Image (cartoon, rainbow, N blue to C red):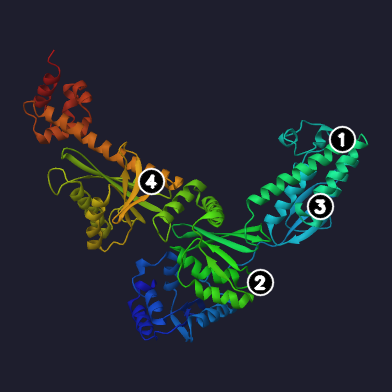
Amino acid sequence: MDLYSDSEKLSRLKKKANRLPLLPGVYIMRDRQNEIIYIGKAKALKNRVTQYFGAGNQHTEKVKRMVSNVDDFDYIVCSSEFEALILENSLIKQNQPKYNILLKDDKGYFYIKITDDKWKRIVTAKSSDKNGEYIGPYNSGYIVKQTVDEARKIFKLPDCSRDFDKISRPCLNYHIGLCDAPCRGKIKLEDYLENIEAATEFIKKGDSDSVSIELLEEKMLAAAENMQFETAAKYRDRINAIKRIRQKQSVVSVSYKSQDVIATSLIGETACVGILIFRNYKLTDKQHYFLDGFSDKESVYSEFLQQYYIDNRDIPPRILIDSEIKNFEIIEKWLTEKSGHKVNFINPKQGEQLKILDMCLNNAAENLSEKTERTGREMSALNELAQLLGMSRTPRYIESYDISNTAGSDNVAALVVFKDGRPYKPAYRKFRIKGFSGQDDYRSMAEVLDRRFCEYEKNEDEGFGILPDLILLDGAKGQISAVLPVLEKHGINVPVFGMVKDSKHRTRAIATTGGDISIKSNRKAFTLVTNIQDEVHRFAIGYHKSLQSRNLLKSELLNIDGVGKKRADSLIKHFKSIKKIKEAGINELCSAEGINSDVAAKIYAYFNKN
């Protein structure tokens, strides 16, 4: 039985929670079997624990599932929030509760394998066996892949699985100078194996920095002086490949020796936390974790950071993070004591560090896009929009409204929905303004939002039953001010912004009650907002024109003897257009509701006078 429908148990837990002290501590949730299912910390135990047993519809699905299984809870009072953090970590590690995020290291170890074929190959491997030579193990699959790629490029080794004892056409790698193409039969086996041996030695020594370009240049010049031009060319190509790789590495190098970069892409209640690990001024690894049941970055990081660093001994002095979340100082203090050196969380606003943070966020968005079947561009646009608007969570479900009329006549409104960055047409809705006559866009917008959230409260319409993450109005400060009292009246807490156009009717900025936010420099967010504004405008204009056309048709039908408003509506509903009514015979006209043979004859005669 759901906890929120079990009034007796809910009442019991509420009473117990209300008796908790307003002191820092750790709370321990248990199920009916007395098993620990969740452990959390709190600055004030009473305030935190009572939230679980309040309105269930405010919780994420993950929290709802957890709370529905709670039968009782314990608590331990601590002297400080920091002490509560230490105790929470210890208890989570001991008990491994079901509903705490547990970042288990299931990546295993990685190896670089030199096969024992006739034509040896250098490949990546997840495990080792008796066949071939193995270098490793490595903790990072990223490092293994990067190292193998570098070795292949420097020593022009193949990355295919062709049979080199058979002559075949070379692939693109040969034509762009990345492979000697043994498939062509132009390189001797002993020369090929010599390259494999040199590449193996390169891998064992480390990376491209361990290779002396000066030494290779000396060998190249010596070979040229001895008229060994093919050997000299081989050294030249090797030197150029190393220089290209070092140039590429410098693009992702940083000004600080060691730092972790952490960013989160969030869509709905699914998050992807991306991590870029820089050591010795270079990117040495990248990781990502998927988490479910989180509605904002603050709740993600409150659990993730502890679990990620709990068994991590390699803690850098700097951690770049894409959030200005409160209470980082508690985790900073914990990591400082754990590592033995000062640790700072940094949220950069400009320069190199911001670019690296954006790179991490884009990687997280790409990984999340694969999981949610959305493109990385769509995910990045939603993340960028959330950041621009100061939202703590990425808006998955965006509603947009526009008003359309002609000097106050045929006054209509349109609602379009973008779900996960794409138009979601099943949720589109049309409105005819009913509360007043004439032209007043502010009153029209207020009426539409009022009707929309009245439907939400009824919970009878599937589309209206969803609460949006963001509302965008076609308009500026006036439209926002008109609808905010409506949302307050219905108890709706959803961010509302306007979409402002320039003199050429193109999206210019995002409007707030305090002024405009320039958006053109945020390319992805700008494109998304422009698409939303164009779509809602198209939908509103389309409905307005169809209504105008319908009214013109209706006014013409009213000129026919025997046709009143009711019969005119019936004809429009049945035939849809004036053309089809004109082309219809008397028998066809009689098929419309309320049209008898006498009226049908008059309609036919009206449109067929000649």
Residue kind at label 2, given as amino acid type: Arg
| Percent x, y of residue 326 | 45, 70
CB within 8 Å, label 4 to label 1: no
Nearest to the observer: residue 272 or residue 528: 528
> From where the camera sits, is residue 375 visible?
no
Residue kind at label 1, given as amino acid type: Glu
Nearest to the observer: residue 261 or residue 396: 261
Q: Quadrant of residue 86?
A: bottom right
Q: Image point 80% across, 48% down: which residue?
A: 213
Residue highlighted by disc 4: 529
Q: CA distance from mark 3 to mark 2?
A: 29 Å
CB within 8 Å, label 4 to label 2: no
Q: CA distance from mark 1 to mark 2?
A: 49 Å
| Percent x, y of residue 422 | 42, 45
Q: Quadrant of residue 520?
A: top left
CB within 8 Å, label 1 to label 2: no
Dot 4: element: helix
Question: Which-is-in-front pick, marks 4 and 1?
Answer: 1
Residue highlighted by disc 3: 202
Instruction: Work out which residue is located at the far top of the displayed protein and give it.
Output: 610
Q: CA distance from mark 4 to mark 1?
A: 58 Å
Dot 1: element: helix
| Percent x, y of residue 549 | 20, 31
Which label's residue is closer to the chain start, 4 or 3?
3
Residue highlighted by disc 1: 230
